Image (spheres, helix red, strand yellow):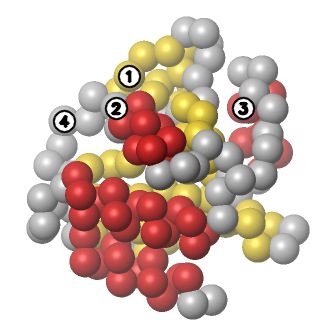
Amino acid sequence: MLEINEVDINGIKSILSDRNIEFHKGVAYIMPESSNDGIDIINEHAPDLRKDLKESGIESVVVRGENHNYLALRSIDTILPLIYGIPFAVFANFITDWIKDNLEENKKVRVKYIKEEGDKYKEIIIEGTESEVKEVLDRLKEH
């Protein structure tokens, strides 16, 4: 499954600003799932992704406020947090390798990324098995 929606980047930048995080191009911002009553809900995979991004030479930040909780996702699928700020090709190569190294072969995964296209921003959501996600990412890299 591939879903592409326009997104208001000012909302994303506001989330960063509210948490005293300055935006820099080329940094992967691992966004919270939501924020309720001033408490950020952070995807359980965020710390691992940040560590693995760092080991790959990609600067990254888990975006969270002072008050936050981790969301334990208890489904058979792996839902990764939304990533914004790094070029799509860098993201696609990293996430393809990460899925291959960290997930069972036929396990479902959902990947979320915000891509800049000129003066517009698109949220890309890809869901499927490792091979299905890789195929969609490869197709998107060609455009």
Q: Residue 44 carries which label?
A: 2
Q: Residue at x 34, y 32 (%)?
A: 44
User: Of 58 and 16, which appears nearest the observer?
Assistant: 58
In whole angstroms, how far apart are the C-alphas of marks 3 and 1?
17 Å
Q: Which mark is nearer the camera, 3 or 2?
A: 2
The answer to whether the residues at label 3 and label 1 have Cβ atoms under 8 Å apart is no
Across and down, in percent, residue 92 comes to: 49, 69
Q: How many labels does the image show?
A: 4
What amino acid type should be assigned to the residue bearing mark 1? Tyr
Q: Which residue is under mark 3?
A: 15
- Say whether residue 29 is visible: yes
Labelled pair 3, 2 in contact (Cβ < 8 Å): no
- Label placed on residue 96: none
Q: In which quarter of the image is residue 18?
A: top right
Are discs 4 and 1 less than 8 Å apart at CB?
A: no
Classify residue 29 by image quadrant. top right
Check the image and report above or below for 16 versus 5: above
For the C terminus, which image quadrant?
bottom right
Picture coordinates of residue 93 (x, y %)? 46, 69
Residue to which mark 4 is pinned: 74
Q: Which image quarter holds the N terminus?
A: bottom left
Confirm or deny contact between disc 1 and disc 2 (CB under 8 A). Answer: yes
| Type of amino acid at the residue the image marks with label 2 | Glu
Q: How crowded is mark 1: few (under 14 residues within 10 Å), some or many (20 or more)?
A: some
How many residues crowd mark 3 within 10 Å: few (<14), some (14–19), many (20+)? some
At horizontal 61% and vertical 43% (from top left) the residue drawn is 59
Residue shown at the point (72%, 21%) measured from the top left: 19
Q: How crowded is mark 2: few (under 14 residues within 10 Å), some or many (20 or more)?
A: some
Kindly identify which numbered label has been placed on residue 70.
Answer: 1
Q: In the image, residue 90 lies at what x, y percent?
A: 56, 65
Q: What amino acid is found at the position of numbered circle 3 in the picture?
A: Ile
Calculate the distance from the C-alpha at mark 3 to the C-alpha at mark 2.
19 Å
